[in-house]
Amino acid sequence: MDATSSRKVRVGLIGAGRIGSVHAEHLAYRIEGVELAAICDIHLPSAEKCARKLDIPICSDTPEEILENKSIDAVVISSSTDTHATLIQAAAYSGKDIFCEKPIDHDLSGIDAALEAVRKAGVRLQIGFNRRFDPSFRHLREKVRSGRVGTPHFVRITSRDPAPPPIEYIKVSGGLFLDMSIHDFDMARYLIDSEVYSVFALGGVRIDPAIGDAGDIDTALISLQFENGVLASIDNSRQAVYGYDQRIEVFGSEGVILAENVPPHRTFCSDRNGVHGPLPLHFFMDRYIDSYIEEMRSFIESVRAGTEPSVSGSDGKAPVVIGLAAQKSMIEKRPVLISEIQQGVNQS
Amino acid sequence: MDATSSRKVRVGLIGAGRIGSVHAEHLAYRIEGVELAAICDIHLPSAEKCARKLDIPICSDTPEEILENKSIDAVVISSSTDTHATLIQAAAYSGKDIFCEKPIDHDLSGIDAALEAVRKAGVRLQIGFNRRFDPSFRHLREKVRSGRVGTPHFVRITSRDPAPPPIEYIKVSGGLFLDMSIHDFDMARYLIDSEVYSVFALGGVRIDPAIGDAGDIDTALISLQFENGVLASIDNSRQAVYGYDQRIEVFGSEGVILAENVPPHRTFCSDRNGVHGPLPLHFFMDRYIDSYIEEMRSFIESVRAGTEPSVSGSDGKAPVVIGLAAQKSMIEKRPVLISEIQQGVNQS
Amino acid sequence: MDATSSRKVRVGLIGAGRIGSVHAEHLAYRIEGVELAAICDIHLPSAEKCARKLDIPICSDTPEEILENKSIDAVVISSSTDTHATLIQAAAYSGKDIFCEKPIDHDLSGIDAALEAVRKAGVRLQIGFNRRFDPSFRHLREKVRSGRVGTPHFVRITSRDPAPPPIEYIKVSGGLFLDMSIHDFDMARYLIDSEVYSVFALGGVRIDPAIGDAGDIDTALISLQFENGVLASIDNSRQAVYGYDQRIEVFGSEGVILAENVPPHRTFCSDRNGVHGPLPLHFFMDRYIDSYIEEMRSFIESVRAGTEPSVSGSDGKAPVVIGLAAQKSMIEKRPVLISEIQQGVNQS
Amino acid sequence: MDATSSRKVRVGLIGAGRIGSVHAEHLAYRIEGVELAAICDIHLPSAEKCARKLDIPICSDTPEEILENKSIDAVVISSSTDTHATLIQAAAYSGKDIFCEKPIDHDLSGIDAALEAVRKAGVRLQIGFNRRFDPSFRHLREKVRSGRVGTPHFVRITSRDPAPPPIEYIKVSGGLFLDMSIHDFDMARYLIDSEVYSVFALGGVRIDPAIGDAGDIDTALISLQFENGVLASIDNSRQAVYGYDQRIEVFGSEGVILAENVPPHRTFCSDRNGVHGPLPLHFFMDRYIDSYIEEMRSFIESVRAGTEPSVSGSDGKAPVVIGLAAQKSMIEKRPVLISEIQQGVNQS
């Protein structure tokens, strides 16, 4: 899109499932300078329901109508993960700017092919690591970058889901490291200006044996060493019964900064047994709703202003590499260097 | 509106100023089952700007077009306070359900005339005491009503604005008790199932002598005694430099429940000097944005369902009576009974 | 005692009851530069038990042995309230420095006689308003005095006991205002560099009708106006089932400072129902133990250094005057000026 | 000592340095049922100073007088680490019950010899892992043991000193894992009813190059896997400029329990820049003073009651083994099994 244009960005949305319909609503109602011009979903009724509710003129069950429509400037890809890499390539070929949900692919060659297509086409690509746009985490990062805690020494990320997804989902999720921890790997990179050097991962099945039967783990502890010497610890669980536990601490030479959980209200009751406060927001759509709006706003702004998106294609690749290293570490019971994973793979 | 109808409520909005344009956006984008059909403002460009942005078909500089339009079911009155009572009467005469910003009037006879018109017309009237719909306060009230703290003994409301309004506004505001404390009087009534019996108010000018010159105070401490014996304390300030301080505690025979301030994020930094956390949300539109959406949703739902609005006309009158008692108490340096104010006034 | 002396202060303790035996232990073990030389109690076994445990050489059932002993420099009076004024006079006559528990007397003429005796004898007198030495409240006051919150506008003191005392005690306590609120009146004066100008008090029986039958109230809300214009609100209850609720806030032109409750540990548990934390310390001897040590250390230091005690005789009188004004206010249902109480009474 | 005896335990204290003089004061003043009968220190003036202040009758510069004194029931060993194992053996040979500061020795054979001597003599031995007696951690453990968080899955221990010790101390400290982390290894074992199976440690010099020059690290991240499957993460730093950071979380199937830092007071100030609260207690003697009293009280009680001490000799050995595994892991850059360290060593 022409950087000097002041007209609205015309967006086509591919995939009207849970996260897709959230993006659709934000594009329709919550973000300025954008027009949601088209929507598609392989399950046509989902697309139609969205189109009707939000007055979207074009609606289909395949992405072709969007990709071939010259008046559409950008696409938002929120279809299933296995379609991401192919759709990125097709959209890049059509010259459209691209927002794509994470992960790009579970396979590094798929990612590399997608990033290469984007590079050749010269279009913009933003990956949906929404947590970077969470008000608390964003504030935390700004403080770290501004030197508020001095030189960072150590990062701790607690990331625990309120409840496991269905077993059917777990089977195709790529495993806990690529499905859940991937957000935390991205967050660690986002907070520390350096790349991960080595990964050591411990994992187990503590919540539900069915998760183990599906070939996955539900509990993990990951130690990262960054190239600049910073250490990081990530702990994950598929089930924190007390809510969605999403906390980060960055320790540095001049202090520590902590992002605490976010509760739905701020009401505390004291009785004979104690002081009782609210649990963290339970559902990711509640906890991270602002971050979804902000990431999309940021994408639309970068398209309008002709600037680089704030979460790049290589930001989309790096956490997958870390996730693959974590898998290897857990299996081989040893720390794994990032360079071991990237050997023989095209660099983005 | 026919209670059995499933079609959308058609709303006309009167007054497209600061709060009016917020209501407009909520009606257009955030609330289901409603169509914002018309808007008017004596300052036509304000109405036009809103109409353009939100695709509102009818736009004018007087309310007549809305009031005479048979296809419009309900009006939202967010024009200046001095127009409220008259507009309520006109809308009631036109048979429209009414949402009106607080206060109905600074004068009890004006309030009574408006409420009488509503009663005769048999339309619905909801008053804009939005704080009743704040998630924290609503949770607090539900807990109090459910007996969570036993029999209430004492309520404390801290209500401090981040900065004083312009002196020009203060001159027409009706004074701190009718402008600021009125929300707290409503909140006290909302939390305690009883009417206020007596009021004792202390006040002074501590922030800005210009406020005193304008005939108002900027700092107040009000003691309420309810008919059921509950005591309440309200402290107000026109300027809390640390942010918008909005806290409530209800003490009872079985415990205490506290609604704390709401910060914009949940990030805490520790350095050599202390642990530093975020201030409360500073701007009332940030702090109470959810409550504005929820009060309007509640109004639309009551219109659609044919039920009583959740904040009635007499709920709109009572806090004004308490405010007048507070004024009298401060001037006469003695506790004033509510019955002293209501004598000789038509009861609603 | 000679200000230049470096020898230990020799103290005689009068009254070995609950608070007396606490003072005894602190004097014996926790404070340097003092020797607990003698103890007496009208109930001799209480004195003997203390003497045995702490190796106190002199033990008796009357204060004469202490008062007549020339080698004793100072007395600590922790006998029952009705003996305070007389013992202060006797100790002053004997030339001993005096620490006396609050209140000096329920009667202003008794207080004035005691203070006059102290003045004539030129001895030191410190009154046991221990809360001034609480680490949180002391920190709060230092911050207020240093201008941390700018010019103070408003003080709020929440002071709620975990459980009512026995009815027999209530009958002789002087009533809630002189027994409980007196600490809060002192605290308000301590925090604000000004004297109280007027008092308005509301009170009731909400906890236990037996308290009402004994002629007292169990719940109170008191509004104070200081001579310098600061407003203060004190809320009291004889029974906060959730623990000993002792909080203070000072609001000023540049901010607010809050002293929160003190819990016994800092452990928080989150489960499916919420986040659960510890109640405040329940027993005043736990909550204020440090303050008891510090007030006694301060007294001993002032005796050794020949300096003025940090809580003077007139600091002991003023809260009683405020308490009497509160009683009058509640009965006469009107604000009462401090000057109404002090008229016709000898000023200290 | 005869379990049925009701007379006081007579204790001899060996080592009147920093921690020794604290134990001395507690034994003299804060604990019932004990008499501090003797004290020795190779630096005689230190012993004499203590003896004078606390009225200890026997004072010497060697432990012989204590060990040979038949009237002394128990010894408290708080001399330098290199003397612990030898003194334990000598005291055991003399038939005295023993409290010994941690660690018993940096060398496993020294530990085993000491424990063997204790076993043969049938005396009691308690090791000074004082943090087990901290009110917050003790509460946390009781809750974990009672099933409050269900089956534990993961433990996190944050343990960061406010400032590094002198380089001279670091050189003889045994290194961060044996000097600092040892407390955390003990705490992890205390909280989880299981032994550590494997250790993975990352470490670096981030605070002060002089620490590296002295052969030590100042920053560490340690992952533990317990035999029962629980994972644990420990992060250590020699310098947390914001105070003594001592926090623990235990996550389980039914919730999480957290022990927060302990501040010196509970005062919070809000100004234009934020809400500012107190740092954690800075000095270990402030933070853990209660735990030092309680561990000694527990020892004296076990001697009087003839029961097993609450921290056994093998509790003293296990953390040293874990520390040696951590050192090996860091050097060899791989997870190390506890069994690798214990092979060829006599089991206690």
Image (spheres, coloured by chain):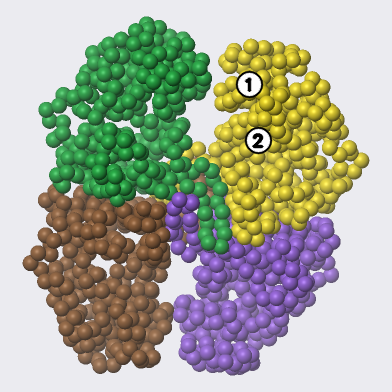
Chain colours: A purple, B brown, C green, D yellow
Badge 2: few (under 14), some or many (20 or more) residues near its Cα, within 10 Å? many
Q: Nearer the viewer, residue D128 or C256?
A: D128
Residue A88: percent from left, percent from top:
67, 81
Direction from residue D26 to residue B302 in the image, left or right: left
Seen at 50% across and 81% down, the residue is A25
Direction from residue D318 to residue A136 in the image, left or right: left
Point out the frontmost of discs 2 and 1: 1
Point out which mark residue D8 bears: 1
**Which residue extends farthest front?**
D4
| Position of the N terminus of chain B by quadrant | bottom left
Q: Is residue D295 visible?
A: yes
Q: Is residue A277 above or below residue D179?
A: below
Point out which mark residue C289 bears: none
Kindly identify the amino acid type of the residue bearing the numbered disc 2: Asn
Q: How many marks?
A: 2
Residue B74: percent from left, percent from top:
28, 85
Kindly identify the amino acid type of the residue bearing the numbered disc 1: Lys
Subunit of mark 1?
D
Q: Is residue B321 above or below residue A45?
A: above
Seen at 34% across and 7% down, the residue is C68
Seen at 76% across and 17% down, the residue is D67
Upstream in the sequence, badge 2 or badge 1? 1
The residue at which mark 2 appears reads as: D130
**2 and 1 marks in contact (CB < 8 Å):** no
Distance from the alpha carbon under mark 2 to that under mark 1 = 23 Å
Q: Nearer the viewer, residue B347 or B317?
A: B347
